Image (cartoon, rainbow, N blue to C red):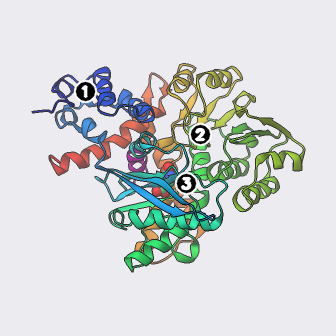
Amino acid sequence: MPNDNHDENSYNNLSLDHFMAGLKKRNPDEPEFHQAVYEVAESVIPFILENPKYQKAGIIQRMTEPDRTIIFRVVWEDDEGHIRINRGYRVQFNNSIGPYKGGLRFHPSVNLSILKFLGFEQTFKNSLTTLPMGAGKGGSDFNPKGKSEREIMRFCQAFMTELSYHIGPNTDVPAGDIGVGAREISFMFGQYKRLQHEFTGVLTGKALAFGGSLVRTEATGYGNAYFMEEMLRHHSDSINGKVCVVSGSGNVALYCCQKITQLGGKVVTLSDSSGFIYDKNGIDEDKLAYLIKLKTVQHGRLSEYAAAYGCEYHEGERPWGIPCDLAFPCATQNELDEADAKVLVANGCKAVSEGANMPCSAQAIRVFQQAQLIFGPGKAANAGGVAVSGLEMTQNSMRLAWSAKELEQRLQGIMVDIHKQCATYGEEDGYMNYVKGANIAGFIKVADAMLAYGVM
Ligand code: GLU
């Protein structure tokens, strides 16, 4: 007997509206989670209706309910001796095809809705990589900005003290995300090793000296450029000679910029939370080297780049109004809305590939699809990061390390394969709907595993 929340109707008479109404009722005040589920349900529900075995087994209802959600208190001491309290989370979403896998985000905006949307997306993304990884996401509302190195260390140690009960190399393998880079991963890995008295590949994105993988830092950005190249190739085109607008200035944006440049494209923008730079001449390898140092070592602002190279700096604005052939949103969720999408289309943009998770709003995606613009959703386009995390897990298990060349080839192969899977299910009257393709391809693998396990 279905319970009050999942009424019988949602199994026998599955409809998008009814399903979404139930989901919203069960998960009030979680708009980002609703948005991520809606994007998937819109394309997967028609597929389920054609394949009743998934409907009868309540697979989509089960997939939208995390296996478990862990919420905990993190207490640490700041440099002035004040006691500080943050909230820590790990949403273990689905481990049907492998250990829970997904990043940790430290940002003041972190809440349950954001982590559930990210964990849910990760289910499909990890499935698409073809590697054996389930899905999870975690983090904290801790703001690393402006904190000293020692404060970050104390926070990471306190966070890991609780998280260590819930993770393990065969259980749940976290990594980085916004606000969590090599430094934070190192502090957390050290604390896990000390607490558990064992050295295992429990986190990915580690430094090379203790089990990290080459190409992991570059992987999400490189993968996004490879995915764009593959989408364009499918449409008899390429990145070569294209003007590209990129947002963000973290790992994803910087290395996406690098690969675009290597593929012959010209990146003219990057952004941070204060504004964006518009460098008409293009951000070449030398300028990028300056930026990587500025952002990752000095933790500086993009306005410093504008001053150093004498280019335009647009304070408080986003880069979508700059005319371009290709757009790569690589900053954060919902950074590109309907109005931005209309401007991109009006300016003749041909394709958009999401380096961040859910950077385009649902309305923006609708605008792109109506204009028949090529659109690569994050769960396919940015899967390169977690894919190389999967390769880091493999290397740790084998206790050996692959070369950069080997890893880059594998990454490129995975991105080509993801494109192929999307193309298998995305064809729609001559328009390649990558959203639909990614959702259905990602769904099938996890759904079939769940069916095989029976009722659980
Ligand atoms: N945070 C990244 C993502 O959104 C990487 C996750 C991982 O490497 O586990 O996919």
The residue at the point 54 percent across, 67 percent down is: 154
Q: Which comes before the other along the chain, label 3 or label 2?
A: 2
The residue at the point 60 percent across, 64 percent down is: 151
* Magenta region includes residue 123: yes
Q: Which comes before the other along the chain, label 3 or label 1?
A: 1
Mark 1 belongs to which amino acid?
A: Leu
Q: Does 436 appear above or below 98?
A: above
Q: How far apart are marks 3 and 2 (CA)?
A: 14 Å
**Mark 2 sits on what residue?**
233
Query: Residue 433, image x and y in percent?
Result: 47, 29
Mark 2 belongs to which amino acid?
A: Arg
Query: Residue 205, image x and y in percent?
Result: 53, 64
Residue stretch in magenta:
122-130
Query: Residue 327, image x and y in percent?
Result: 65, 35
Q: Is mark 3 within 8 Å of ligand 1?
A: no
Along the viewing direction, whichever of 189 and 142 lies nearer the viewer: 142
Q: Distance between the residues labelled 3 and 1?
A: 34 Å
Along the viewing direction, whichever of 426 and 256 lies nearer the viewer: 256
| Mark 1: few/some/many CA within 10 Å (<14, 14-19, 20+) | some
**Mark 3 sits on what residue?**
412
Q: Is residue 406 left or right of residue 348?
A: left
**Mark 1 sits on what residue?**
49
The residue at the point 58 percent across, 20 percent down is: 371
Q: How far apart are marks 2 and 1 (CA)?
A: 33 Å
Number of the front mark, 3 or 2 = 3
Query: Residue 315, image x and y in percent?
Result: 78, 35
Q: Which comes before the other along the chain, label 2 or label 1?
A: 1
Magenta highlight: main SS: helix
